[in-house]
Amino acid sequence: MLRGNGAWQSLRLPLALVALGLFAHGGALAAEPRVILLRGWFGVFSTGLDGIADQLKALGIKTEVAGHLNWSNEVADILRDRAAGHSGPLVLVGHSQGANNVIDMARSLQAYNVTIDLMVTLSPFMQNPVPANVVKAIDYYQGPGWGQPLEADRGFHGKIVNINLVDDPTISHIGMDKSTKVQAEIVQDIIALKSN
């Protein structure tokens, strides 16, 4: 069972109303989050990330989908963006090998004192611990089965939420990113960054 007992249904509101209610501030947009979604192995199994990206882009949130092999290029882009003065919330989302690589991204950015406001992993396996620069980490996995819960690295003071989906027969490792329930929860957690 996913969080919120159907809280994902609140996303059925027209996107325009949600965008107006949460993102408008005196006619200008608030500090805009940047969201990077990393596909799994060779990018062939993580097409559900495109659905998340489309929903976020419709809300005016800067979002991109990349292959997991490009994670170090994404780190360089983030550092350039920060050097240019962009300081909005940073969100990293990854599926399968991409889930492992968003943890690698966070660890690389820790060396530059870049905060990861939200990190979402979908079915990571044999992953590294969550570094201390992550404020909140949410992990969707199936155990026993594929994926593992996240653990904190030394010095971590944020929040980790591990969500075991093993009891939901409609969700598999390959299809976890395509689950409308999981997608809706991820979008809702990203939207919450804008309303804080």
Image (spheres, rainbow, N blue to C red):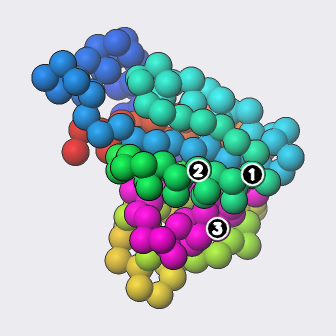
Q: Residue furthest left?
A: 26
The quadrant of the rendering that contains the C terminus is top left
Can residue 28 be seen here? The reply is yes
Q: Give the amino acid type for the residue marked by disc 1 in the picture.
A: Asn
Is the residue 101 above or below the residue 36 in the image? below
Q: Which residue is mark 1?
A: 70
| Dot 2 and dot 1 residues touching (CB under 8 Å) | no
179 drawn magenta: no
Residue labelled with disc 3: 104
Magenta region: 97-121
Residue 168 is left or right of residue 78, and the answer is right
Relative side of 69 to 92, left or right: right
Q: Nearer the viewer, mark 2 or mark 1?
A: 2
Going from N to C along the chain, the mark reached first, 2 or 1, is 1
- How busy is the neighbourhood of tag 2: few (under 14 within 10 Å), some, or many (20 plus)? few
Residue 172 higher or lower than 57, as above or below: below
Q: Which mark is residue 90?
A: none
Residue 127 higher or lower than 145, as above or below: below
Using the image as rendered, state which of residue 118 and residue 66 is in the foreground: 66
Q: In x, y percent, where is residue 186?
A: 48, 41
How far is mark 2 from mark 1, CA to CA?
11 Å
